Image (cartoon, rainbow, N blue to C red):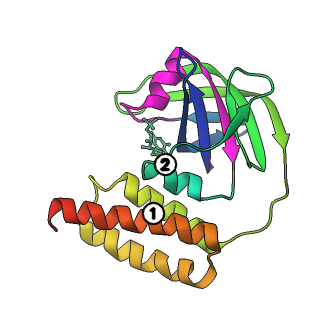
Amino acid sequence: MIRESIITTLSKAGEVHIAPMGVIWRDDMPVLAPFRPSRTLDNLREHPVAVISHTEDVRVFAGCLTGRRDWPVKPASVVRGVVLEGAHFHQEVEVDAVEEDATRPRFRCRVVHEALHGPFRGFNRAQAAVIEAAILVSRLELLPMEKIEREMDYLRIAVEKTAGPREQEAWGWLATRVAEFRAEKGR
Ligand SMILES: Cc1cc2nc3c(=O)[nH]c(=O)nc-3n(C[C@H](O)[C@H](O)[C@H](O)COP(=O)(O)O)c2cc1C
């Protein structure tokens, strides 16, 4: 089971880094799998602790992929780390072991604290569509442009039918990024 979450890590110097990441859940054990190279990977090696924040504000996912990483955070309760403000649930984790891998090492973690801050308000198709579009944007260099445009066209239907203002804003950032990428590549 993979849950798309917001991962906050700290460098050795204490600088905060925020990144969307799919957390692999092996029963109750979260596994973080950052690709090489990435800031999250470096931070987990320097300071083997992370906070997993669960939010329905999909602007954080879209924002991190489009250069908007400055989201408000507050100190974690147990680990030296930070929690995303507005998260409805968060989990503080420590790294127990690392499975080394040439492209994507896996950090097996242990939850040392978790806290609920607000209710689950139900599924929204536009939120799911924004997360899918954010994944497409994270793979702009890897996927064919036709596939990206075809999938964006499909995902746009859910956004047009079901989005609120936050989902519309997030979608706008991602659609602009795809258009800019297309213009840069002259395709
Ligand atoms: C929903 C979602 C899930 C993602 N999951 C992962 C992941 O599991 N591992 C990873 O390395 N990047 C993942 N990414 C891409 C990272 O968020 C992005 O590349 C990020 O910049 C990681 O690099 P950084 O730590 O240097 O910021 C995901 C992106 C999205 C939108």
Between marks 2 and 1, how big is the CA–CA gap?
A: 10 Å
Amino acid at the residue labelled 2: Arg
The reply to whether discs 2 and 1 touch (Cβ–Cβ < 8 Å) is yes
Residue that appears at 53% across and 23% down: 44
Q: Position of residue 60 (x, y in %)?
A: 58, 52
- Tell me if residue 16 comes above or below residue 181 in the rendering: above
Residue located 53% across and 15% down the image: 13
Q: Is residue 185 left or right of residue 109?
A: left
Query: In the picture shown, does residue 152 fall above or below 140?
Result: below
Q: Residue furthest left?
A: 186
- Left or right of 67? Residue 69 is right
Magenta segment, which residues?
33-54
Q: Residues within 10 Å of mark 2 (few under 14, many from 20)?
A: few
* Rendered residue at 21%/65% (across/down): 183
Magenta stretch encompasses residue 134? no
Residue 99 visible in the displayed image: no
The three-letter code of the residue at mark 1 reads Trp
Which residue is label 2 attached to?
68
The image position of residue 185, as x and y in percent, is 17, 60
Rendered location of residue 156, percent (x, y): 47, 78
Q: Secondary structure at mark 1?
A: helix
Label 1: few (<14), some (14–19) or many (≥20) C-alpha neighbours in 10 Å = some
- Which image quarter is the C terminus in? bottom left
- The part of the image, by quadrant, that contains residue 151 is bottom left
Q: Is residue 135 rendered to the left or right of residue 52?
A: left
Q: Secondary structure at mark 2?
A: loop
The residue closer to the viewer here, 95 or 72, is: 72
Q: What mark, if any, has residue 173 been given in the picture?
A: 1
Considering only order in the chain, which callout, 1 or 2, is on the residue closer to the N terminus?
2
